[in-house]
Image (cartoon, helix red, strand yellow):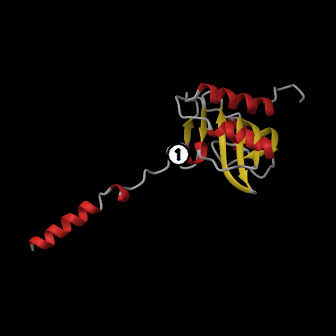
Amino acid sequence: MKLLLASIVLISLGSLSPQNKPTPEVTPYEKYVMALPATDKVEILAVRGLSGNERKDVDCHRADIICKGFMPQQIVAAKTLTGADANRISMRWRKLRRGNGAGCFAPAYILRFYQKDELLLVTDVCFHCCNITLPGEGGDGIASMCGNESAIADFKDFVMTTLPYPQPGRKP
């Protein structure tokens, strides 16, 4: 009996050795931001949230309406980046870090990252409150992206220079 008990204790202690410790789970932020795989295409969509009256009669089959995600949105401008340009925005994206975001969350942009025609990530981006949406983030899926001031400034400048948000009443 003592031998059996001693064997169980030794086996239990062996399972606690460093090589058997569980690896920490990768967070959605690490997976979709910091470790986003190489991309060869990125779509930048400038969007506007639909108002209350527009939302109740929204036609989700229209090409300029997105009904998946945070709320129904209308695409007001779009640009597709490929090759080196897709790589430039992806490099900036990977440098973003968690920080303190505010609470407005009125995304003006949606980004879609692709690798060989496989959609890797769709994210809503709000530069006002410094938040993004991420799959698996929990709760409402919103995460802050403003932990590194120079990285967010560089990313925001790149996005808004590449696809300036259209001003109402002004023709592009």
Residue 159: x and y in percent read 74, 33
Q: Is the residue marked by circle 1 packed among few (<14), some (14-19), or many (20+) residues within 10 Å?
A: few
At x 63% / y 47%, what residue is drawn? 36
Residue 168: x and y in percent read 82, 26
Q: How many marks?
A: 1
Q: Quadrant of residue 96?
A: top right
Residue 90: x and y in percent read 69, 42
| Residue 112 visible (yes or no) | yes
- Of the pair 168 and 91, the residue shown nearer to us: 91
Looking at numbered disc 1 in the image, what kind of residue is underneath it?
A: Glu
At x 34% / y 55%, what residue is drawn? 18
Q: Is 75 displayed left or right of 128 in the figure? A: right
Q: Quadrant of residue 16?
A: bottom left
At x 19% / y 64%, what residue is drawn? 9
Quadrant housing the C terminus: top right
- Please say if 168 is above or below 119: above
- Please say if 24 is above or below 146: below
- Please say if 162 is above or below 114: above
- Of the pair 33 and 45, the residue shown nearer to us: 33
Secondary structure at badge 1 equals loop
- Of the pair 17 and 94, the residue shown nearer to us: 17
Q: Is 123 displayed left or right of 14 in the figure? A: right
At x 9% / y 71%, what residue is drawn? 2
Quadrant housing the N terminus: bottom left
Q: Is 52 displayed left or right of 167 in the figure? A: left
Q: Is 45 displayed left or right of 93 in the figure? A: right
| Residue 164 visible (yes or no) | no
Residue 148: x and y in percent read 58, 28
- Of the pair 121 and 50, the residue shown nearer to us: 121
**Which residue reaches farthest right?**
171
Residue that badge 1 annotates: 137
